[in-house]
Image: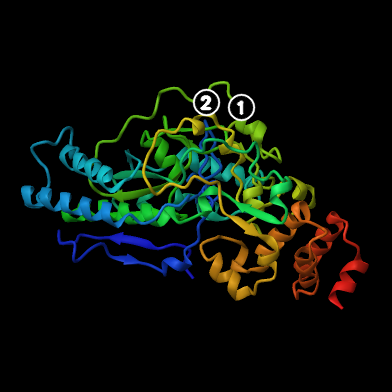
Amino acid sequence: MSRSPRFLARRLTRSFAVGVAMETTSKNWRKSTNPKLALRQPRADQPGEAENSAEADHPGGVAEDTRAIEVAKASWIEQEDADAGQRSSSDDIGGFDSGLRAQIESLAGNLGIDAVGFASAEPFLAARDALKNRQDSGLNGGMKFTYSDPVAATDPSASLPGARSLVVGAMAYRAPLASRPAEAGAVDSTSRGVGVSAAYSVSDAYSALESRLGEIASLLCSKGWQALVTVDKNRLVDKEAAVRAGIGWYGKNTLVLIPRKGSWFVLGSVITDAPLEPNNAYSGPACGRCSKCIEACPTGAIVAPGVLDASKCLAWLLEAPGDFPEEHREALGNRIYGCDDCQIACPPNGRQEHGGSDYSDRLGPDIDLAELLLSSDEELTIRFARWYYAKNQPRYLRRNALVALGNCGDPASERTVEALVASLSHPSPMVRSHAEWAARKLGISQKCLSTTSS
């Protein structure tokens, strides 16, 4: 099962009835991948280790804005009729198609893409070296993603031969909160038995961005150029592309920060052979001496500015196979998917300046842990279809929920005990061992569990 849809736009007619050729799986089965983890693309000078988007693939109530797309289509059709589908020639400067670039910028704005930038499609050689160095030093923590093929992931022409330009887009997945907890996974009396997930997991901002970048690809194809949309895939180092395109800068937490908007964004690109003038790299104020994200990480996973040790990152450990490391279980709090702490602590994320009605005002949904643990595998697979977890096996959701339950469960609750009893008889040894840990953590004796089961 493919993890995410693929848009492949070749030279098509200008008609929207034709559209962009695509290979796709059902949107219901799309994985909402943690932006901090999905597309690892560090740099040599500011080594980024995680994808934006987070990850941490991640979305706060973003839904497909079909009306915005239809308005943008109508605007494009008017422009298309005006220029009769011809490539710009009189406005070309230095071999670049400035007229086409202006049309793309206008279309992106009409579609509701929060930021757009342009970059050359030259290979990201520094990122390639950094990926290999991180992998050699074990900082990838066993992750694959772009580490699986650093050469292809850092060379746009590997995906689209003859690539000349990148059109990079960013879409927000949550709006600023009036007030935020000091730690997303902090456990108090109001969170007994309740698990939380990261903001990007609320809905699928990746699909919304992919669809809108698909409209940009259609525009390019109507002009006779080739275009390939890549969003939430392992075929391109999207953070590197965003930084090269001048959209923002690398924060010390490895995420891309957009001026006046912060880092609550997913990223994606259109690879094209069209000659589009690149932006200059961002050169304004950046992180300076601020290190709040580093201090906020509950496991010390940000081992240096811009360097993430994924073997300590809660967001990755919740997705990784195997047992959840005992040394990090208490730090997990009541999280069951993703971790937003480094973004919550980041000052620019408290000064966001973006609008729109499809942004969430929550970090993520509350999830009844006992209900999750008492659900069938089929129910879990359907409910959490967009989440990425190891091998697509629900036992990993149960593993995560058991650690969270051990940290925040109410030992006097019949539902808590019922969920533990059911987990102790689960066919997976991993689930059973985590249930035993949770019971010990809550101080629930084996005698009590045995009595309940009988």
Q: Position of residue 293 (x, y in %)?
A: 61, 33
Marks 2 & 1, CB-CB < 8 Å contact: yes
Identify the coloring.
Answer: rainbow
Query: x%, y% of residue 399?
Result: 71, 62
**Taking 452 as reference, is 182 left or right?**
left
Mark 2 residue element: loop
**Crowd class of label 1 (few under 14; some 14 to 19; many from 20; radius 10 Å):** some
Task: Examine the rendering and report whether any part of residue 159 can be seen.
Answer: no
Q: Residue at x 35, y 44 (%)?
A: 168
Q: Is residue 301 visible?
A: yes
Q: Position of residue 193 (x, y in %)?
A: 72, 56
The disc labelled 2 sits on which kind of residue? Cys
Q: On residue 287, which mark appears?
A: 2
Say what amino acid the circle numbered 1 marks. Answer: Ser
Residue located 48% across and 38% down the image? 176
User: Circle 1 sits on which residue?
Assistant: 291
204 left or right of 83 in image:
right
Q: Secondary structure at mark 1?
A: loop
